[in-house]
Amino acid sequence: MKLSELYTKTSKSIPADESSNNARLLIQAGFIHKEMAGVYSYLPLGKIVLDKISQIIREEMNRIRALEVQMSTLQPKDIWEKTDRWDDKKVDNWFKTKLNSGQDLGIGLTHEEPIVDSMIGFINSYKDLPVYVYQIQNKFRNELRAKSGLLRGREFLMKDLYSFNLNEEEHHRYYEEVLGAYFKIYERLGLGKDTYRTYADGGIFSTSFSDEFQTLSDVGEDLIYLDEKKKIAINKEIYNAKNLNKIGLKESDLKPYKAIEVGNTFSLGSKYTDALDLYYTDKDGHQKSIIMGCYGIGVSRLMGVMAEKFSDNLGLVWPMTIAPAKIYLIAIGQDQKTLDKAQKLYNLLTQKSIDVIYDDRDVRIGEKFADADLLGVPIRAVISSKHGDQEIAVKRRTENNEKMMKYIDLINLSK
Ligand code: ATP
Ligand code: MG
């Protein structure tokens, strides 16, 4: 990408109507556009980052044999009435609307009901199980407070996976596989060492424990108690002597931390499948209940978490895996020879499929350096007439010193 072709611009001033650090930075860098409180659009650079996060999640979901679908956002009322989740007294953050005919519609805040409904006709016999499906799709929730930028949106991107198994035992085996996939995802996003499996309330979904994945952060809304040796935590919501005992945690081993919920997994039993009349017939011809699980990850929230955690006073500091580009290329000097050199290197990197942002704008060099930092591209590469042939000054976003290196070393660094 050439910056002269990018329509978004960075801004020097902090957006006045934004109190969260993640949204401020992302707006200043031109990654997102605020439509209203809790509602953001993704601009070209932001879309690249969001897609890279989604792709990591997609790869790990595919690895555990889940199939990708895309469910609709508009929802008929009747399926939600069958599980008693239509009533605003039961679920208070629904966005709802009506057809011209007056018929009620819901705007999807989660998808257990429609997913189960979509299985009718496909799951009949024990031979049709297990089934694992997921989607990466926008959810809508009328959140009371939406002051945390991407951390709490009224419209936000979620990955939701649903499992359908023959019995509890098969369900639990798959559930553990999903937890393994979740750890891999956070690891690949660079959040591995700060993200913990956390025992939590079953919430609106069930009465037993659910597992949350909590990333430590001072801006987190949740309070968790962490056992640093066991690398397991318990949410304050269910912190009491009885539960500690059940889980096998000791009060003296626990330390409180603020954290952000980046994922949540639930065992649902047959609550939804029974209510929506989805059963299977076993080998002996008996009708049996289907055991279900659901597993969420906040995709856009993760982008906010990463902007919070991977940033400094100069701007964003993306890890290689999700940065909008790996290299930010700058030419010092507007003489033809230097410009030709920069263009050649740009072509070479593009040929090798190494994402590069070439700052070919006619602006002061100081402005280019400042934008390289604000955008948070991991490697800055500077071409100058003073350098030898095939030589380039390279600086990592996380380091202070430039190093001279050959093109081939730059290419290796970007892999
Ligand atoms: P919270 O307790 O933060 O309101 P939740 O428990 O209601 O979240 P789930 O229904 O478990 O959320 O959704 C799955 C995941 O989606 C969460 O773990 C979180 O990462 C993300 N998520 C939930 N609500 C939002 C939101 N309003 N904005 C952005 N991400 C969200
Ligand atoms: Mg949750």
Image (cartoon, rainbow, N blue to C red):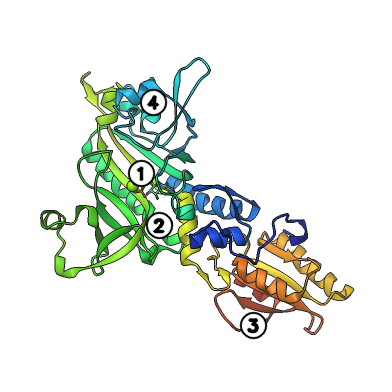
Kindly identify the residue that appears in the image at 71 percent across and 71 percent down. 368
State the image coordinates of residue 255 (x, y, percent, origin top left): 24, 68
Q: CA distance from mark 3 to mark 1?
A: 44 Å
If you read the primary sequence from the N terminus, does the residue marked by circle 3 or circle 1 appear first?
A: 1
Can you identify the residue that label 1 sits on? 295
- The local secondary structure at tag 2 comes to helix
Instruction: Answer whether residue 414 is visible to the viewer in this image.
Output: no
- The local secondary structure at tag 4 comes to helix
Find out whether the residues at labels 1 and 4 contact each other: C-beta distance under 8 Å: no
Identity, as a three-letter code, of the amino acid under mark 1: Tyr
Can you identify the residue that label 2 sits on? 184
Can you identify the residue that label 4 sits on? 119
* Residue located farthest toward the right when viewing the structure as drawn: 336
State the image coordinates of residue 64 (x, y, percent, origin top left): 39, 45
State the image coordinates of residue 270 (x, y, percent, origin top left): 25, 31
Taking 96 as reference, is 41 left or right? right
Identity, as a three-letter code, of the amino acid under mark 3: Glu
Find out whether the residues at labels 2 and 4 contact each other: C-beta distance under 8 Å: no
| Residue 340 location, quadrant | bottom right
Other-residue count near label 4 (Cα within 10 Å), few / some / many at <14 / 14–19 / ≥20: some
Kindly identify the residue that appears in the image at 32 percent across and 23 percent down. 81
Identity, as a three-letter code, of the amino acid under mark 2: Lys
Q: Quadrant of the C terminus?
A: bottom right
- The local secondary structure at tag 1 comes to strand
Q: CA distance from mark 2 to mark 4?
A: 29 Å
Q: CA distance from mark 2 to mark 1?
A: 15 Å
